[in-house]
Image: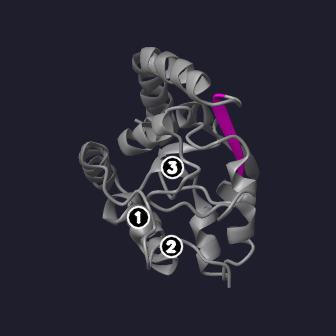
Amino acid sequence: MPRRAFDIVVASLGLLAGAPLLALAAVAIRVESRGGVIYRQRRVGRGGREFDVLKLRTMVDGAEHIGAGLAVDAGDARITRVGAFLRRTSLDELPNLVNVLRGEMAIIGPRPTVPSQVAQYTERERGRLAIRPGITGWAQVNGRTSLPWAQRIELDLWYIEHRSWRLDLTILWRSARLVVAGDGLYRGETGGWRPK
């Protein structure tokens, strides 16, 4: 099966199965705090093309302009109670499936990053933009945001060089386990991106 067809089938089934959860989450978000249910953030996709990634809002409205900005750590006061649950279960990522249907993302690939991060890529690191970004990927199942940024990029580049259906199935299996365990959600002391 071609990868794009796989992405469309999985995203369609995921949205169909997740529709009741999305509806419940939307109500809970609106009840707890003011602001929109869907959070849009500019990201960079394949070939450097920018798009708006869609997520369920897990923080107070306008959080990116408060406190630590784009950096989010465990216990961040900007995260709502509903948002903490959505993050812990990865349900906040469900709207990413719409990005997949639009062709902006894939089910598996490097997580899309913001333009300010891509602006600091080396020529080698720009290789990360060779394929569609994914909802989950090799770096995601090997530490997520708790990994140092350079290590995450290297894991993504390794995936691109060794991509196969067998590796993709391994990533899907490990992703399911991560959702249950909730590991690696926050960058901690050494993980995540920091401006150069």
Q: Residue at x 51, y 29 (%)?
A: 8
Chief secondary structure of the magenta portion: strand
* Residue type, numbered disc 2: Ile
Earlier in the chain: of badge 3 and badge 1, it is 3
Q: Mark 2 — residue?
A: 153
Alpha-carbon distance for marks 3 and 2?
14 Å
Magenta region: 37-43
* Pick the front one: 181 or 111: 181
Location of residue 98 in the rendering, given as x and y in whole percent from the top left corner: 59, 30
Q: Mark 3 — residue?
A: 134
Name the disc covering residue 163, or none. none
Earlier in the chain: of badge 2 and badge 1, it is 1
Q: Residue at x 57, y 67 (%)?
A: 128
Location of residue 133 in the rendering, given as x and y in whole percent from the top left corner: 56, 52
Q: Is residue 71 above or below residue 33?
A: below
Q: Are marks 2 and 1 in contact (CB under 8 Å)?
A: yes
